């Protein structure tokens, strides 16, 4: 069932991220920063569709692990902007590799034709939800 696949995939991905000292969700936050850092926590909340306390906790944890840092906005001292450290930038390729490995494992015995059908079905399911 879809629920079982989803749960196991999340567990597997979570375990592989732990090897990089990350938790599920933190990879999405970093992914946004890899596209361009220097954004605010509110912008991260909007992008991640998370509540501010959730993002605050992720930011604190990532900062403690040396992956990001916060800096006051030069024009508005009330605003804190979030930037990647070199250590955070270096995580991009390993996280991308973990994600690709996860997808490859999931789709291992599925033919190209079946993958195309699956993709169409998944798009329809997504459309049904939104």
Image (cartoon, rainbow, N blue to C red):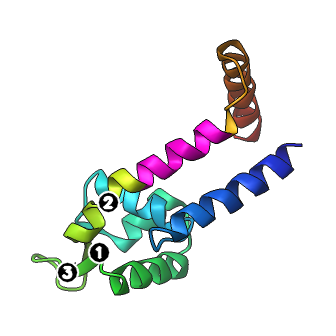
How crowded pointer 1 is (Cα within 10 Å; few <14, some 14-19, many 20+) is rated as: many
**Residue range highlighted in magenta:** 95-105
- Tell me if residue 19 comes above or below residue 74 in the rendering: above
Quadrant housing residue 84:
bottom left
Q: Residue at x 61, y 66 (%)?
A: 15
Judged from the image, the secondary structure of the residue bearing numbered disc 3 is strand
Tell me if residue 84 can be seen: no
For the stretch drawn in magenta, the main secondary structure is helix
| Residue that carries the numbered disc 3 in the rendered image | 71
Q: Which residue is mark 1?
A: 68
Q: Cβ–Cβ below 8 Å for labels 2 and 1?
A: yes
Q: Nearer the viewer, mark 3 or mark 2?
A: 2
User: Which circle's residue, 2 or 1, is located before the other in the chain?
Assistant: 2
- Does the magenta run of residues contain 103? yes
Please tell me in which quadrant of the rendered image residue 117 appears.
Answer: top right
Q: Quadrant of the C terminus?
A: top right
Dot 3 or dot 2: first in sequence order is: 2
The quadrant the N terminus occupies is top right
Residue 31's tag is none
- Left or right: 97, with 36 as reference point: right
Relative image position of residue 29 (x, y in whole percent): 43, 63
Residue sitting at x 68%, y 39%: 106
| Circle 2 residue | 33
**Foreground pick, 74 / 33:** 33
């Amino acid at each position: 069932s879809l629920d079982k696949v989803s749960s196991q995939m999340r567990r597997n991905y979570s375990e592989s991220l732990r090897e990089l000292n990350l938790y599920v969700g933190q990879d999405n936050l970093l992914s946004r920063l890899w596209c361009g850092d220097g954004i605010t926590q509110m912008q991260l909340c909007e992008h991640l569709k998370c509540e501010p306390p959730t993002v605050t906790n992720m930011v604190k944890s990532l900062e403690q692990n040396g992956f990001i840092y916060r800096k006051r906005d030069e024009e508005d001292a009330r605003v804190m902007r979030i930037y990647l450290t070199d250590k955070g930038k270096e995580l991009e390729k390993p996280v991308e590799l973990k994600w690709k490995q996860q997808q490859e494992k999931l789709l291992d015995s599925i033919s190209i034709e079946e993958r195309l059908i699956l993709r169409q079905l998944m798009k329809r399911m997504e459309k049904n939800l939104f």
